[in-house]
Amino acid sequence: MAGASVKLGFCPIGKFVFSHEDALRYKALIEEKLRQWQVDYVTIDGVLPDGIVRDQTHVDPVVDHFKRAGVDAVFMPHCNFGTEGAVGMIGAKLGRPVLLWGPRDEAPLPDGRRLRDTLCGLFASSKVLHKLNVPFTYIENCRVDDPVFQKGVDTFLRAVNVADALRSGVRIGHIGQRIDFFWTTIVNESELLERFHVEVLPLDMVEFIRRTKQRASGHRTAYQKELNELKASAEIVGFDDDAPMINVLATRDEMLELGDRHNLAGFAIQDFNSLIDEMGAYCFYADSAVADRYPVGYESDIHGALTGVLLSRAAYNRAPTYLVDLTIRHPANDNGILLWHAGAPLSMRDPADKVKIGHHWILPSPLSGMTHFRLHGGALTTARFDGDRGEYQLAIGQGRSIDGPYTQNNYVWMEVDDWPHWERTIMQGPFIHHTGMLYGHYGDALVEACKYVPGLQPVRLDKSANPLIR
């Protein structure tokens, strides 16, 4: 489960009533699970007696300790009951995402006494968190060894990692400018910066082309060697000589250098027409290579690039994302849809397909450089960050790949639970035809992340939301 860079504050909650010994026993059992799952966590051992909050006077020492430790979130398992005032104040003063859970209570003892009333304490604490306007994630009251507990912790940590992108800040490099006839990609950069800490860094297209050509010229021998090797594994057609493809390889490296130099989280790029005219090729093979490291918003889609960042965060940046078009419905499956575009991450290629670099089959251009290969199968998560008039939403859905007819460029057919519902929801806005996709199912984490991003509302497209975590 290891939560990547998420540091969790482990803050067990008890109370002066019920069994303190049983609370200590459950504190140890829960902490053992965190170690087993390789969660990066900070305890309050040494800060409070027995490392358990049992009184409202414990609030400030705990908050100060967690702030010094730099925790990203706080987990407050209720170990025998709950000191609800302390729970609420810790959550409010710390200002970090809160995870609320407690182990399921056993049967009363033979004499009728109970060692714990964990569920009752959770009800009280949730009310105080709500009263103090502290957003929190709740995992169903269950046993320590129940799968729902591990699933809930994993989902919460991924949600924190997603939300942190819009709390700590994201920088998107925009190469060029918005393409005139793509009105769907008009965005409010000022609002993105003010409300979501998303900075759009303008990268001048003229300067980008100049530096890329210098790079191609200065490293021509190395690029020629790489291109010769690429020709042995890929089908490359439509070029009279090697110069355009050398420019494409240099475009890739210029983008990667810009990403490192400016600490970018992703790119939005004006794919045509200036770039392709100057390079003598569509540069989508460069995008494919870059997309294995950075989310790429094709056609100057800044919201699309940001969507890719959020999806990638849900997977702890361990898997690439891809901005696809929602195109045509499956000819034989009413719940099937074609996810299609060009410039897919090379790692998404189906092993049975060979990379082909060729002509654009839609635009009447004599230039080559478009990527063509089918994507591999698997579970899929799609998402789209978008908004108009100050109202922002994140559309989230899950599906799976299915067989479907051959088409050109990069594609995979996806089956969902109720495509007409998806279609109506997306059509009614504020969304467009571009959606980010990622292999694996991370819908619950994305929905949960929206709790911790003020002004961002989740829209669940599928009906498979995990009923065990709220």
Image: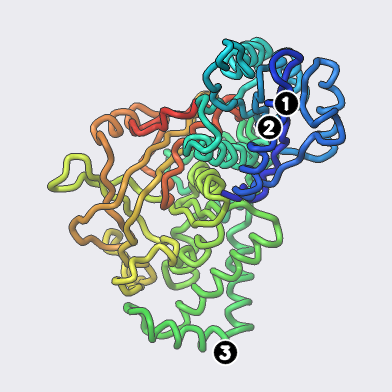
Mark 2 belongs to which amino acid?
A: Arg
Quarter assignment of residue 468: top left
Q: Do tag 1 and tag 2 residues touch (Cβ < 8 Å)? A: yes
Q: Outermost residue, left direction?
A: 332
Marks 3 and 1, how far apart in space? Answer: 72 Å
- 311 horizontally vs 160: left or right: left
3 or 2: tag closer to the N-terminus: 2
Q: Element type at marker 3?
A: helix
Residue 305 picture location, percent across and down: 52, 48
Residue 206 in percent (x, y) is at 60, 62
- 411 is higher (above) or lower (below) than 23: below
Q: On screen, 29 above or below 49?
A: below
Q: CA distance from mark 1 to mark 2?
A: 6 Å
Query: In the rendered structure, which amino acid carries the disc numbered 3?
Result: Thr
Disc ID at residue 221: 3
Q: Mark 2: give few (<14), some (14-19) or many (20+) Cα within 10 Å.
A: few
Residue 276 makes an appearance in the image? no
The residue at 57%/17% (across/down) is: 109
Q: How is the image coloured?
A: rainbow
Q: Which residue is mark 1?
A: 21
The reply, left or right, for residue 317 in relation to residue 133 is left
Picture coordinates of residue 27 (x, y %)?
Answer: 69, 33
Where residue 421 sits, quadrant-wise, is: top left
Residue at the image point whose x is 43% and y is 46% from the top: 436
Q: Amino acid at mark 1?
A: Glu
Residue tagged by mark 2? 25
At mark 1, the secondary structure is helix
Q: Nearer the viewer, residue 323 or 361?
A: 323
Q: Is residue 445 above or below residue 223?
A: above
Q: How much space separates mark 3 and mark 2, taking CA atoms?
A: 66 Å
Residue at the outermost front position: 110
Comes first in the chain, label 3 or label 1: 1
